[in-house]
């Protein structure tokens, strides 16, 4: 998907729809937030043009956002006045370190992680005495 095909919300929806099919154990909330932050950064801090690619295989997810800027994104100290600095910190917390791949006309920022089972999904196996499958599980 590119910026010509839709906006940040469209990118989020397309990524989570794909993620739910390609990587059933994916944390779709984390996927949506990573996509939202990376696409927002590309739209806000570059010429505005971006291309989103999401790949999933088994339990691995790759989110890539390409833009025309060669500037390497850097995490900033978050501001408490609502003026930013949170995006890359959020992405790093959810997906780990980012890869920045230089290209002939800009760069690609890649977040890659192995999906974990979502906390709200039932765990396999019988539930003793009708107990909730979430009892004793960390959020």
Image: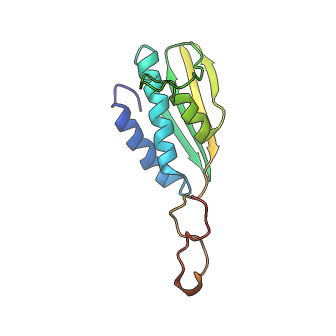
Query: Image point 56% across, 35% down: which residue?
Result: 91
Q: How is the image coloured?
A: rainbow
Nearest the eye: 129 or 54: 129
> Is residue 72 depicted above or below 88 in this figure?
above
> Is residue 84 depicted above or below 16 in this figure?
above
Q: How many numbered discs?
A: 0
Residue reaching furthest front? 80
The x, y position of residue 44, in whole percent, is 42, 19
Nearest the eye: 124 or 67: 124
> Is residue 125 depicted above or below 102 in this figure?
below
Residue reaching furthest bottom? 129
Q: Quadrant of the N terminus?
A: top left
The x, y position of residue 124, in whole percent, is 60, 73
Q: Is residue 82 left or right of residue 63?
A: left
Query: Image point 60% across, 38% down: which residue?
Result: 93
Query: Image point 59% across, 23% down: which residue?
Result: 75
The x, y position of residue 123, in whole percent, is 58, 70
Query: Image point 59% across, 84% down: which residue?
Result: 128
User: Residue 92, located in which quarter of the rendered image?
Assistant: top right
Nearest the eye: 114 or 135: 135
Q: Is residue 49 left or right of residue 112?
A: left
The x, y position of residue 49, in whole percent, is 41, 19
User: Residue 3, located in which quarter of the rendered image?
Assistant: top left
Q: Quadrant of the C terminus?
A: bottom right
Q: Is residue 131 left or right of residue 12?
A: right
């Amino acid at each position: 998907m590119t910026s010509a095909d839709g906006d940040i919300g469209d990118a989020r929806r397309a990524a989570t729809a794909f993620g739910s099919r390609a990587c059933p154990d994916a944390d779709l909330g984390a996927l949506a937030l990573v996509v939202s932050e990376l696409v927002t950064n590309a739209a806000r801090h570059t010429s505005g043009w971006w291309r989103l690619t999401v790949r999933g295989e088994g339990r691995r997810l790759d989110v890539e956002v390409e833009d025309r800027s060669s500037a390497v994104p850097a995490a900033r100290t978050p501001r408490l006045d609502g003026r930013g600095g949170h995006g890359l910190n959020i992405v790093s917390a959810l997906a780990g370190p980012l890869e920045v791949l230089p290209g002939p006309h800009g760069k690609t920022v890649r977040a890659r992680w192995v999906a974990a089972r979502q906390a709200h999904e039932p765990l396999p196996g019988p539930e003793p005495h009708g107990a909730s499958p979430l009892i004793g599980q960390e959020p």
